[in-house]
């Protein structure tokens, strides 16, 4: 499964790059392709722990966000198929992820896939649409469509059917605001997504037309893997279907729930998310309880951890009936990749220091509370400050991407948490947005000293 817009994690591949040479081998030609297209090299965002956050890229460099998403998913796909010999029965994308799935399926070679992503951004620049928005609703798609009919909000449309109790609608900002208020009045949680336009809506028809025209100039070939489109609701197995998908990508809804149910009914028992975070895996388990959904890059991991997350899956050798990989054209000169300094990220280092501190605590000394207790306290503190129900703040919920907590608010909340546990803030300017979950923050808290002079924390 190939996730969409929100599947960005700064330095997502940093630890993997230390263990897996295939990471840099895959990124080099993608970096070169991105630079030729006037974008930043995606390795900057995937290997450097100082990379911008999701909100920063959405606001300041959406084109770089898109190339980073494409590169991260293509790297993980190569690791799964070439390193771990896990060849998929079928590929499934979600929204933007459908374009990545086309490249993974072999319809577009990696450099052409990068050009497809760039063509999408160029279409937005050439035919800028009116500003709009998207609203996530904790209700079924059918119920949401009934609500829109009942309200008479014809300008708002279903954009994504994600799971039996989660969907997204899109449209102009003013009617979308009325839908949000109506949802709140009937007790349905509604969350405005941080996007500039009404994706999967007819407002983007002109952009879609321009994108289709640009895409026809790119070289496409036959798919080497079976591909199912949640937008078209069918297989993509010929050039006509590819053209239909490109044309429909921005204006038709993503019917992910139907796609998951259909594939499961046809025998799919394991769903593997081929991208950072675990959004699609969570939607799958909410749709078909009991299936195995794996998100191997839910957080930054190294090679051994990636292998462990795939335990129990049997490598499938290619058979003679599987179309061979077609030769790739010569790639452009490789761009220089910035290698991260330490092998682990701050959140991972905090976990290591937590274990070390526990081992070194002198007998009789006052020990820091266990991690589970710390997470529970943080959940209560953050929920009260943010106005969220505590159950929304799960251990692995991303504070920014999932809950919309900006860096300034994160700094303020962590300062409160440090005071609550009698800890001092780090003096080294630690970047709190590197600690994306309550569990990671609990690990950081346990490493901070008690007492002392407080210093600033960089957001």
Image (cartoon, helix red, strand yellow):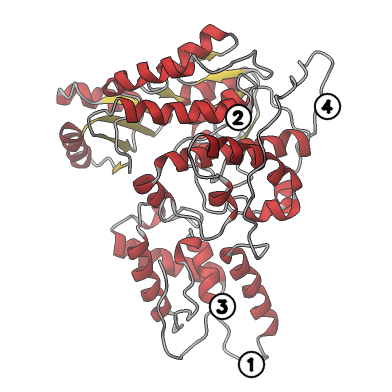
- As helix, strand or loop, the secondary structure at mark 3 comes to helix
Q: 156 or 68: which is nearer to us?
A: 68
**Mark closer to the chain start, 2 or 3:** 2
Graded by Cα atoms within 10 Å as few (under 14), some (14 to 19) or many (20 or more), the crowding at tag 4 reads few
Q: Residue 447 carries which label?
A: 3
Q: Is residue 393 left or right of residue 22?
A: left
> Looking at this view, is 156 or 346 the one in front?
346
Task: Give the percent coordinates (x, y) of residue 106.
Answer: 65, 21
| In this view, the mark in front (2 or 3) | 2
Q: Earlier in the sequence, mark 1 or mark 2?
A: 2
Q: Name the residue under label 2.
A: 111
The disc, 1 or 3, on the residue closer to the chain's N-terminal end is 1
Q: Which mark is residue 317?
A: 4
Query: Label 4 to label 3, Cα distance in Å?
Result: 45 Å
| Percent coordinates x, y for residue 287 in the rendering | 50, 31
Q: Is residue 214 above or below residue 459?
A: above
**C-alpha gap between disc 1 and disc 3:** 19 Å
Q: Quadrant of the C terminus?
A: bottom left
> x, y (%) of residue 87?
73, 28
**Residue at image mark 1:** 364
Q: Disc 1 or disc 3, which is closer to the eye?
A: 3
Q: Which callout, 4 or 3, points at the residue further toward the start of the chain?
A: 4
Q: Pointer 1 and pointer 2: residues touching (CB < 8 Å)? A: no
Label 1: which secondary element: loop
CA neighbours of label 1 inside 10 A, class few (<14), some (14 to 19), many (20+):
few
Classify mark 4: helix, strand or loop: loop
């Amino acid at each position: 499964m190939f996730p969409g817009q929100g599947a960005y994690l700064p330095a997502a591949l940093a630890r993997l790059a230390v263990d897996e040479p295939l990471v840099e081998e895959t990124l080099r030609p993608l970096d070169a392709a991105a630079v030729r297209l006037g974008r930043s090299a995606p390795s900057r965002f995937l290997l450097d722990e100082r990379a911008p956050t999701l909100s920063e890229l959405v606001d300041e460099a959406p084109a770089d966000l898109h190339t980073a998403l494409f590169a991260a998913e293509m790297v993980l796909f190569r690791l799964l198929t070439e390193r771990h010999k896990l060849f998929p029965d079928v590929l499934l994308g979600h929204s933007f992820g459908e374009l990545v799935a086309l490249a993974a399926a072999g319809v577009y070679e990696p450099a052409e896939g990068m050009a497809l992503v760039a063509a999408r951004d160029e279409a937005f620049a050439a035919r800028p649409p009116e500003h709009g928005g998207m609203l996530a609703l904790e209700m079924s798609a059918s119920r949401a469509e009934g609500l829109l009919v009942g309200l008479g909000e014809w300008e708002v449309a279903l954009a994504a059917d994600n799971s039996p109790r989660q969907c997204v609608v899109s449209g102009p900002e003013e009617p979308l605001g009325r839908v949000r208020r109506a949802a709140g009045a009937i007790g349905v949680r509604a969350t405005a997504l941080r996007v500039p336009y009404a994706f999967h809506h007819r407002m983007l028809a002109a952009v879609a037309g321009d994108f289709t025209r640009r895409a026809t100039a790119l070289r496409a070939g036959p798919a080497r893997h079976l591909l199912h489109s949640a937008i078209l609701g069918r297989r993509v197995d010929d050039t006509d279907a590819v053209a239909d998908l490109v044309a429909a990508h921005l204006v038709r809804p993503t019917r992910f729930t139907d796609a998951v149910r259909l594939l499961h009914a046809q025998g799919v028992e394991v769903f593997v998310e081929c991208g950072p975070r675990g959004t699609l895996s969570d939607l799958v388990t909410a749709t078909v309880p009991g299936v195995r959904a794996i998100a191997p890059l839910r957080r930054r991991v190294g090679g051994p951890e990636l292998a462990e997350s795939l335990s129990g899956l049997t490598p499938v050798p290619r058979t003679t009936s599987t179309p061979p990989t077609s030769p790739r054209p010569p790639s452009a000169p490789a761009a220089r990749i910035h290698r991260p300094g330490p092998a682990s990220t701050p959140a991972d280092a905090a976990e290591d220091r937590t274990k070390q501190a526990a081992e070194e605590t002198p007998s009789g000394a006052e020990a820091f509370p266990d991690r589970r207790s710390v997470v529970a306290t943080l959940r209560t503190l953050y929920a009260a400050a943010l106005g969220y129900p505590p159950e929304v703040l799960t251990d692995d919920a991303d504070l920014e991407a999932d809950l919309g907590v900006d860096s300034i608010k994160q700094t303020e909340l962590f300062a409160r948490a440090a005071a609550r546990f009698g800890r001092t803030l780090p003096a080294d300017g630690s970047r709190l947005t590197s600690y994306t979950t309550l569990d990671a923050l609990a690990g950081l808290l346990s490493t901070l000293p008690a007492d002392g002079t407080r210093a600033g924390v960089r957001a």
